Image (tube, helix red, strand yellow):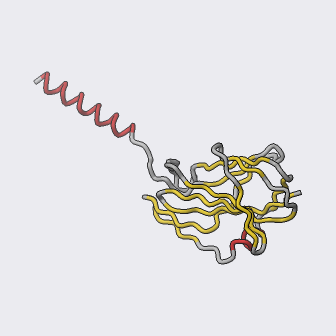
Amino acid sequence: MKGFFRLFIGMFLISILTGCIGEDYDVGVPTAHLYSEDLATSVQLAEGNVSWSSSSGDVDQKIDDIQEFGLSQEKMKVTANEKISLDFQENVRNSGDIWTDPKITVALLKDEQRIELELHENREFQIPNNKGGYVLEVVFTSSRGTAQYVGNILIQ
């Protein structure tokens, strides 16, 4: 009887520990942030078109005119040839931060012009010499879906 009681207590403790070790694999839509030496703080980009699926629900958001939406965001002033770092963080609204091998693209949009920017392994890209106002577009694609982020960039 004593052995059965110990076995029961042992199994009970193991099941409690197993429940405590569980992780959240929700992988909700991340938030995109820009960092540079010239930007005093990090700048969060606005979510544009999003098609994302997770256990906390699906997110389908469609912006008809992405350039108009991007230009309506607060203007970020950057300098030509400046290096900008891009970071993705867990979205506190729906949690989750496991993105395996996401594909990330960065481009500048102006009227019908699209300038693709090279994104390095450390998620850093360089602002081109073309001065003026642009919409910065970042597209994040993972197995859960695609999220587009935009910002209003003024290259000086």
Of residues 114 and 44, the one nearer the viewer is: 114
- Considering the image in quadrants, where does the C terminus appear? bottom right
Residue 14 is situated, as x and y percent measured from the top left of the image, at 29, 32
Residue 29 is situated, as x and y percent measured from the top left of the image, at 55, 57
Q: Residue furthest bottom?
A: 64
Above-or-below relation of 57 to 43: below
Q: Residue at horizontal 74%, vertical 67%?
A: 109
Query: In terms of image quadrants, where is residue 2?
Result: top left
Residue 23 is situated, as x and y percent measured from the top left of the image, at 42, 43
Q: Residue furthest left?
A: 1
Instruction: Answer left or right for 80 relative to 107.
Output: right
Above-or-below relation of 137 to 36: below
Query: In terms of image quadrants, where is residue 46?
Result: bottom right
Q: Residue at horizontal 62%, vertical 50%?
A: 88
Query: How many marks overall?
Result: 0
Query: In terms of image quadrants, where is residue 54?
Result: bottom left
Q: Residue furthest top?
A: 2
Instruction: Answer left or right for 71 relative to 93.
Output: right
Residue 146 is situated, as x and y percent measured from the top left of the image, at 55, 62
Q: Residue at horizontal 65%, vertical 77%?
A: 64
Above-or-below relation of 150 to 26: below
Q: Residue at horizontal 74%, vertical 52%?
A: 43
Instruction: Answer left or right for 58 relative to 105.
Output: left
Of residues 123 and 98, the one nearer the viewer is: 123
- Considering the image in quadrants, where does the N terminus appear? top left
